[in-house]
Image (tube, rainbow, N blue to C red):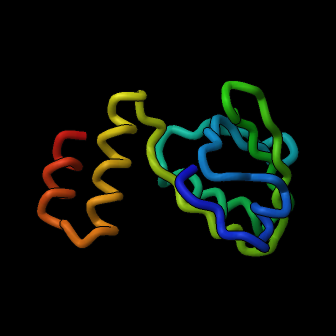
Amino acid sequence: MDTVEEGNDAWTAGVRAGDVLLVWSRGNVRGSFVSPFDLTWIETEQKPYGKITLEGLRAGKTQTWVLGHDLWYLQVRPNFSEALLILYQDAERLVKSGKITEAESKWQEV
């Protein structure tokens, strides 16, 4: 998880930045997170039919979150290895400081 906006359904459910999403379920329908685009699909195609349970990890420990119909406001990224995560975060810092060309080089490394 890259960011979670405070005050929304995901925040209330306990989802926090740094959490790793692994699987989701709604009743007997279940799937795994393979790419960051899966979350958008779940919000669009599954959330209208009922609460969604997300399962994942926080600091290596299993977590479960139940999200409802409200807006989730989650920004996700791929689950990078430690080395790639450092490069990715370096690129984000460069963008925030206005160094777009340098950030682009970092992202190309990733």
Residue 47 percent coordinates (x, y): 75, 63
Q: Please identify the quarter of the rendering in which residue 101 is found.
A: bottom left
- Residue 35 percent across, percent down from the top left: 47, 44
Residue 40 in view = no
Residue at point 60% right, 45% down?
A: 18
> In the image, residue 48 lies at what x, y percent?
77, 69
Q: Is residue 54 visible?
A: yes
- Which quadrant would residue 70 be assigned to in this image? bottom right
Which is more toward the observer, 23 or 85? 85
- Comparing 53 with 11, the one in front is 11
Q: Nearer the viewer, residue 82 or 35?
A: 82
80, above or below 69, in the image: above
Q: Is residue 65 left or right of residue 24?
A: right
Horizontal relation, residue 78 to residue 54: left or right? left
Q: Is residue 83 left or right of residue 2?
A: left
Position of residue 67 measured from the top left corner of the image (x, y, whole percent): 82, 58
State the residue at coordinates (28%, 65%): 95
Q: Residue at x 77, y 44 (%)?
A: 25
Residue extending furthest toward the top: 60
What residue is at 81 percent from the left and 71 percent from the top?
69
* Residue 71 vertical position relative to residue 64 in the rendered view, above or below: below
| Quarter containing the C terminus | top left
Please count the marks in the image: 0
Q: Is residue 103 left or right of residue 47?
A: left
